Amino acid sequence: MTATPIGNAGDITLRALAVLKGVAAVAAEDTRVTGKLFGMYGFKTKLISYRAENADRATPVILARLARGEAVAIVTDAGTPHVSDPGAALVAAVAAAGHKVFAIPGPSALTAALSISGLSAKRTLFAGFLAPTSSARQKELAEVKAVEAALVFFEAPHRIVEALEDMLSVLGDRDAVICREMTKHFEEVRRGTLSTLVDAARADTDLQRGEIVLVVAPPVPVDAETAERDLDGALRKALTTMRVKDAADAVAGALGLPRRAVYARALELKEDA
């Protein structure tokens, strides 16, 4: 598992260069992308296409090479394989066949964003990409609302405004950092609360472009009295876009209240509407 640059080609490690040049073949998420990297360094190593869509066909080919005693590297388009990219199934198959798997560490958007976020937290939860629809996204956010950790998300640029809006609605107005186009020419880091970042993303279309990593601060403890007071307002807002059950699940997770009680109150509000 060999890490490649997430943007700046100079970030590749000396060990990675030696591995990519010396192995018999490299399994790549997109051979065109990896081919450009190879062109920079004059590598002629055999490239094998390996992605989710062709894994069933490519895996036996890779296993056959390993069985012959050949070394094979796997790379993703950018960063470390299996961090929100293909790789897990191949590693499992290789290990099951009795072959050794080695990590060739290097660039990762996850650790890069954390390192410059400035957000203090004892723990970190990597949540990957959120669901593309608002209702599903809010439900996923509710599931991690109470986790006492910095939350790290990857997000598509065309959904950044909606994602920030849902984070503000479900997680509350926490400190957060937008890391955009990391290590690339137009790299940008925008810091603030979720509410200020929502406004910034709406107003500045540049924030709706490129590769985006969001780092959100851990939750601030909320007392039970405050949570109860906020319940009706949160439920009424959630019920405008979600079914009763989904709204209750989202709000219960966001406010840290018992789901059964929140569901009962949601039914009452729905009947009174």
Image: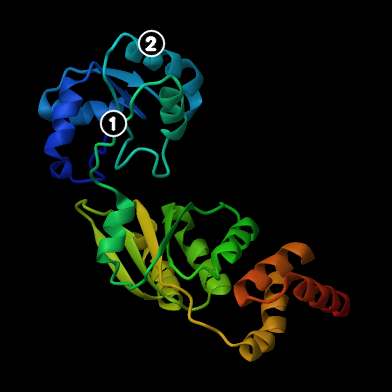
Task: Answer with the quarter of the image where residue 71 lies.
Answer: top left
Q: State the image coordinates of residue 181 (x, y, percent, origin top left).
A: 28, 54
Q: Is residue 191 left or right of residue 23?
A: right
Where is mark 1, residue-wise?
33
Instruction: Give the residue drawn at x 13%, y 28%.
Output: 18
Vertical arrangement, residue 70 with respect to residue 199, above or below: above
The amino acid on which the numbered mark 2 sits, given as a three-letter code, is: Ala
Q: State the image coordinates of residue 196 (x, y, percent, origin top left).
A: 41, 77
Q: Residue furthest right?
A: 271
Secondary structure beneath label 1: helix
Can residue 240 be seen from the camera position used here? no
Secondary structure beneath label 2: helix
Instruction: Give the residue drawn at x 47%, y 23%.
Output: 55
Can residue 9 be seen from the camera position used here? yes
187 and 10: which is toward the camera: 10
Pointer 1 or 2: first along the chain: 1
Which quadrant of the figure contains the C terminus? bottom right
Q: Which mark is residue 64?
A: 2
